[in-house]
Amino acid sequence: MNLRARLRTTPAVWTAPLWVGIVIFYFFHALHLEDPYEEVIAGPLWAPQQVAQSLFYFYAFAYAITCGLAVWEGGRLRRDGVWTLAPGRSRFRIAADVLLPVVCAGWLILGLPVVMRLIETRLFPTPQALAPLLLGMGLVAAWAVIGCALGQFTTRLISAPLSAVAVYYLITKTGQVDPVWLRHVSGAPDTSLDFGEQYRAVTLLVPFLFTASVAVAVAVWWLPAARAVQHGARAGACAAAVAFMVLCAHAASGWGYGNGPISTGHASARCAGTAPRVCIADTGGAQDQLDEVRGQIIQSLATLRRAGVKVTVPTTVTDSLLTGRHKKRSTRTEWWLPLSHQAGDNGPGMTGVRYGVLLTAVHFPCSFPRTFKEGQSADWVVNHDAALLWAALVVDADEPYLAWRRGEYGGTFQNAGQVLAKVEQRAHDARRLPTHRQSAWFRTEQQKACRLVQETAR
């Protein structure tokens, strides 16, 4: 059959307006329902993450449409008696010719949202970014083989739509049920990617081999060979498929919910200066403000030092966005701050940078509880927070600090407004003192807070 005739008869073409319309509509509906276009392009932008996000909504749809179309084509081969004709071409060649438009349809369902997302974010598609797309393309081919075989034994008018619905339901529901390995072998990766992360090979190979082994076992039934050879090949293929499926399920059973193997730290950064050397993610959304960010860090440290606060200048200040989901804690010499989130278009700006410096640079001579526990005294809070608010006023970062503490107080104290008012009064009164007395007040306030928290711990 020539190309024109094939395109005229294949359901992949005459159903295209329906599924292409669904893809385009759902792309703009789902991917921008929570994140408007302006927020998306503001960053942070990481190609593997954006590709994975765009594919998440379309894996099940692509497999379902592919299987349904393949069932229809398989039923047409049975109706026309193609398998019983003289073997001018092998069954594999016939199936490949019939399924090529179907597979291309499934590939288009997956490729269209990826292309639109990359154009939208102006990101370059690296090989690592396209790995989830290649997984989907491989599984589309596998579902096409499975669907074609199903169409050989069923009434296509009924089984084609039912199989599409069944596959869609199967893929989507495995992400909501136990055991956990079902989520990881479904072909729609259960693990999302953070900035700088990409899937390890095993994360994508496991779902591919799980479904592809079934497709290979099905295709073996089309072998043109003697009956005895066919029986042996089919039995061996079925046994191998079961073995592969068991191995894949076993490998995925050790993964947690949304926690398939990933590799981190792949995002590039741009750095400037020394002591401190400041590094920002290259596509984090604030890369063009590197010099200003570094200037704010240096200025904040100098301002705190002039005010009498003992601060240590770190060797490096690195964007915590570069660490992915596994955040690192700052040390005296190496700071990890959310620079891209703070200085980017979606963040508070340079006020956020100064706020990060404040919380990392200002230390107390004792430790404090990270959360307020019911039944424990919190008398230390007023002195502790007044001292930090004074330091925040020094570097002009009081607004984010007050917003944070206001939220903490509201869930802890019945008189949250009175506590906050007392903290603000003490800090503002201290700012009115002569400069040389403010540093002494700050140290005294620190000592009071430490004494009170130590009494609480007894």
Image: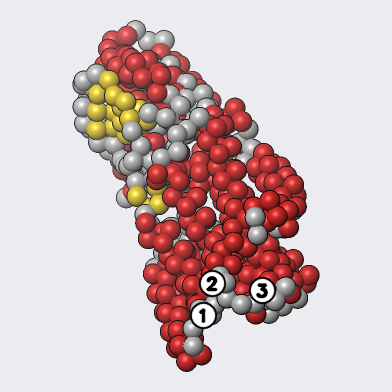
Which of these two is toward me, 322 or 16? Answer: 16
Q: Earlier in the sequence, mark 1 or mark 2?
A: 2
The residue labelled by disc 3 is 82
Could you say which disc has been placed on residue 90 in the image? Answer: 2
Q: Secondary structure at mark 3?
A: helix
The residue at the far top in this view is: 434
List x then y, in percent, for residue 308. 27, 16
The residue at the far bottom in this view is: 228
The Cα–Cα distance between marks 2 and 3, rounded to whole angstroms, is 11 Å
Q: Secondary structure at mark 2?
A: loop
Q: Is residue 364 visible?
A: no
Q: Give the residue drawn at x 50%, y 41%.
A: 50
Q: Give the residue drawn at x 32%, y 50%.
A: 458
Asked if the residue at tag 2 contacts the one at tag 1, i.e. Cβ–Cβ closer than 8 Å, the answer is yes
The residue labelled by disc 1 is 224
Q: Is residue 265 visible?
A: yes
Q: What type is the residue that disc 2 sits on?
A: Ser
Q: Earlier in the sequence, mark 1 or mark 3?
A: 3
The Cα–Cα distance between marks 1 and 3, rounded to whole angstroms, is 14 Å
